[in-house]
Image (cartoon, helix red, strand yellow):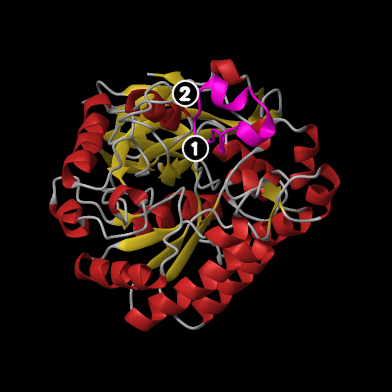
Amino acid sequence: MSSFLLRGVRPLGGDPVDLLLSDGRIADVGVVGSVAGAHTVDADGLIALPGLVDLHTHLREPGREDAETVETGTQAAALGGFTAVHAMANTSPVADTAGVVEQVWRLGQQYGHADVRPVGAVTVGIAGEQLAELGAMADCPAGVRVFSDDGHCVSDAVLMRRALEYVKAFDGVIAQHAQEPRLTEGAQMNEGEMSAMLGLGGWPAVAEEAIIARDCLLAAHVGSRLHVCHVSTAGSVELIRWAKSKGWDVTAEVTPHHLLLTDDLVSSYDPIYKVNPPLRTAADVEALRAGLADGTIDAVATDHAPHPDEAKDCEWAAAAMGMLGLQTALSVVQQVMVDTGLMSWADVADRMSTRPARIGRVDGHGRGLEVGAPANVTLVDPSTTWTVDPHALASKSSNTPYRRMTLPGSVYATFLRGNATVLDGKLA
């Protein structure tokens, strides 16, 4: 195992110090002399963050290796500064058994670019009819603690209640894709002025908000943990704020694209902007930013959703929903939250590492940059800019909505348990 001496780095944007990473731990913080055998990194001007943790990633393997694999997805994660990702269950076969989640977990161990924590399906085949083997997935070597039918809502209230009750036994959490299916039949984009102008089926905000309200009440009733995936409306932020004011164990995430992009982009009819939940209004974006800044929204999660070219290079109605997100997430957060003064780098560490690790029960991640902590560290150069080239990304897919966009900041290095996965902006 290598040792790295990071000279003059700024932990969480603070004063410069030296960080020594050795034997998988942070061995020293302060003014560090020469260390025999250590690789010295000139980190002057770089910001150190605890390794980022993504609660919501689609790695597509098994079954859709044409879009992404655990190998390419975790390469993208490392290049984006992530040291741990949660792999969603809507694979083929669905990750609804101990055998499938263990396969995904072992693939993550094999490639080593980032820790992979499988998310187990709530229901068999994510069909919303009967509970999957939640206990077996929790007890297998993968140790699943997050369960979600993401891509589909657990719309049956009785089934949702039973799932919330079941996961209490092993401190699990149900991560809900909040979408009332009857209210979104035929929906193509956010319901509003733009959908009326474009003649596309509208996706009302209440379809998300109604499920969030119901599930907050259910979680409170049974005393269980609820996590709300990809919050996208101002009303959803208010509901989560209300639930937290009651002391209920409810957490939520927002995606980078919902923090930056708005539904007016759909006027291009370019399917690159087709996503679930849909891009919303500028007012919703402002509410999401405010909710993330004040801590109502706990985490930034990418919802990294790769698709092969043919799934996006087609007419709007036939196109798949989803966007890439792992390599651009930190830059988007810097642009809309840090550079605007809404959040500090310490806040970024909290929303993109500490809280996600706590929600997902990811041991060894999300810790402070202190002596003895696991050496999961991300170095960011906030002074640079880069232009997004879809075909230069590590993902097997190229469906990024940020193509040709110039974004601030770049990941200089990522360390997973003291081993460099990225150095000088490239895979190590």
The percent coordinates of residue 169 (x first, y second) are: 20, 69
Residue 426 included in the magenta stretch of the image: no
308 relative position to 28: left or right: right
50 relative position to 63: left or right: right
Which disc is residue 177 wearing?
none
The percent coordinates of residue 392 (x first, y second) are: 55, 16
Q: Tag 2: residue type?
A: Ser
Query: Which residue lies under the disc numbered 2?
Result: 395
Up-down relation of residue 62 to residue 89 (above or below): above
The percent coordinates of residue 412 (x first, y second) are: 50, 27
The image quarter in which residue 401 lies: top right
The image quarter in which residue 71 lies: top left
Quadrant for the N terminus, please. top left
Could you tell me if residue 355 is visible in this image?
yes
Up-down relation of residue 405 to residue 233 (above or below): above
CB-based contact (under 8 Å), mark 2 and mark 1: yes
Q: Tag 1: residue type?
A: His
Q: Which secondary structure lies at badge 1?
A: loop
Quadrant for the C terminus, please. top left
Measured in 3D between alpha carbons, the distance from the residue under mark 2 to the one under mark 1, in whole angstroms, is 10 Å
Query: Which residue lies under the disc numbered 1?
Result: 304
Up-down relation of residue 298 to residue 274 (above or below): below
Q: 380 or 421: nearer the eye?
A: 421
Residue located 47% across and 40% down the image: 48
Residue located 82% across and 51% down the image: 196
Look at the image and give the residue range highlighted in magenta. Answer: 304-325
Could you tell me if residue 361 is visible in this image?
no
Number of other residues with Cα within 10 Å of mark 1, as a class: few under 14, some 14 to 19, many 20 or more: many
Residue located 66% across and 57% down the image: 289
The percent coordinates of residue 406 (x first, y second) are: 71, 27
